[in-house]
Image: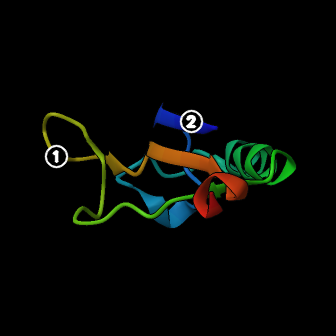
Amino acid sequence: MVFLGDFNAVRSRSKRKGIRVGVDHSSEIVGFNNFIDANLLLDLPIVGKNYTWFKSNGSTKSIIDRVLVFEEWLVR
């Protein structure tokens, strides 16, 4: 099975730049990583881009587009 899309969540603080100081996204990060781990999914790396979403003025950028797959899917 493959999950592909804009998850609107990051896996670490380094994957989101330009957010307001003082905003804590740690529960979002932990929750998203727990979802991936609990479902035994692999997060395939994105090639060619450092970020997949940009605010129109360029002040904010994130990696939120993902391809999540079951490991079994890769070995078939």
Contact (CB < 8 A) between labels 2 and 1? no
Q: Which mark is residue 58?
A: 1
Q: Residue furthest front?
A: 76
Q: In this image, 8 relative to 36: left or right?
A: left
Looking at the image, how many numbered discs can be counted on the residues?
2
Kind of element beneath mark 1: loop
Q: In this image, 68 relative to 30: left or right?
A: left
Residue type marked 1: Gly
Against 27, residue 17 (above or below) is below
How far across and how far down the image is residue 76, in percent?
A: 62, 57
Residue plotted at (69% across, 59% down): 71
Q: Quadrant of residue 9?
A: top right
Kind of element beneath mark 2: strand
Q: In this image, 75 relative to 21: left or right?
A: right
How far across and how far down the image is residue 74, in percent?
A: 59, 59
Q: In this image, 18 relative to 6: left or right?
A: left
Against 54, residue 43 (above or below) is below
Whether residue 6 is visible here, answered yes or no, is no
Residue type marked 2: Phe
Residue plotted at (55% across, 61% down): 13
- Crowding around mark 2 (Cα neighbors within 10 Å: few <14, some 14 to 19, many 20+) is few
Write down the residue under mark 2. 3
